[in-house]
Image (spheres, helix red, strand yellow):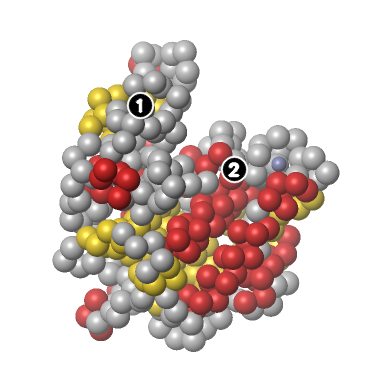
Amino acid sequence: MTSNRFCVFCGNPPEKKNREHILPQWLLDLTGDPKRVVNFGTNYKNGRTVRFDWLNFCVPACESCNAEFSNLEGRAKSYVLRLTAREALSSIEYSDFLDWLDKVRIGVWVAYHFIQGNPTNIEPSFHIKTRICQKDRMVAIYPIAGDGVGLNAFGVESLIYHSQPSCFALRINDLLIFNMSTDYLFSARCGFPFPKSRYIALDGDNPYLMHMSDFQITRRVKHPLVRWKIAKPSIHLYQPIMNGSSDERFQSGFLGDYNSFDSYLARHTMPPYPSGKGILYFQHQDRVEPIIDINQPIEFESINGCESRPMHELVKQVYKFQIYLFEIGEFTAKNRELLISQLRRKKALIKWNKNVISYYSALGNL
Ligand SMILES: [Zn+2]
């Protein structure tokens, strides 16, 4: 299944090539027989269903890149073990865990390009190193009923995920971990700088580049951080991430921040200032709590019977949010044909997700 062309971490031809397990060995051991054969969906080139065991879910990587990330992998293992025991992690640990989710989300995306025979015909324009901790990100953790053992990645086979790997979920035994990350998803509502104007120009000098302008900052938190309804999880954390910029107008070195010192941002980012990396915000049902003390343990919140959602509802939520995130992206093009074909493509990708959503809704009606 692997292609030898590039390293999943740096995107260069792999140096002293070795293989990176996208879903690491420790996770496979934790969730069943690592040699179990799994259905990975369809290869759109030959129409065949792709099946192989988890241990072969690998992509090429440089030896040095792999080594660079092995410490994160070790820490992620301890976080997952503690989460499965419903133990608290601190803000700093959750922020690190969000790095790991970025790594897995992008790694799975690269792997699926190979598995599915690249159906949307795009070349990965970024890799793990250039995408980790780069955009607003969130995690919601749901305890699920039963004491089953298992590992699933939801949303990763969708065509929207193919063009935009911004939302997926991992089921690890009796936990469902829902994760989203995209540009300025909730920066504004955390009181961070955000561009009023944002679009992707499909043609011109830099096709597919995001154009952002008219940056503003309110320094006020707004509840809820994301306006779309999310099923109540036990852990519900948001972390705004500022983008580095060499534009001299932005004196702190981050996009949209015109000041060399901003007391709101200093209080609401991880030390040392200016890191551009937000603290975590806990989204409660009735309010948003900025977690200023980064060493404070963050405990699981209990979920009442009436708030708890069955697994298929939580899986459906992944495909719904993929649509939401995909729809907020605006496009322009000088070439009308290009714009029309882009809109047509967008419609087809959304329809694909809507079919999956109907499937899960039907499951709920059984
Ligand atoms: Zn590399």
Label 2: element kind: helix
Can residue 109 be seen here? The reply is no
**x, y (%) of residue 205?**
47, 13
The label number, if any, that marks residue 250 in the structure image: 1
Q: Which residue is drawn at 53% across and 37% down?
A: 120
Whichever of callouts 1 and 2 sits on the residue coming sooner in the sequence is 2
Q: Residue 139 versus residue 170: which sits nearer the camera? A: 139
What is the C-alpha distance between the residues marked 1 and 2? 24 Å
Q: What residue type is labelled 1?
A: Phe
In the image: residue 256, left or right of residue 118: left
What type is the residue that disc 2 sits on? Lys
Which x, y percent locates residue 258? 30, 28
The residue that label 2 is drawn on is 129
User: Residue, x 45% and y 61% (percent of image)?
Assistant: 92
The answer to whether residue 286 of the structure is visible from this angle is yes
* Mark 2 Cα shell of 10 Å, populated few (<14), some (14-19), many (≥20): some
Q: Is mark 1 on a helix, strand or loop?
A: loop
Dot in front, 1 or 2? 1
Which residue shows up at 31% across the image and 61% down it? 291
Q: Which mark is residue 290?
A: none
Say if 50 sits above or below 242 in the image: below
Residue at 60% x, 76% y is: 31
Q: In which quarter of the image is ligand 1?
A: top right
- Residue 180 or 338: which is nearer the viewer? 180
Q: Is the CB of mark 2 within 8 Å of ligand 1? A: yes
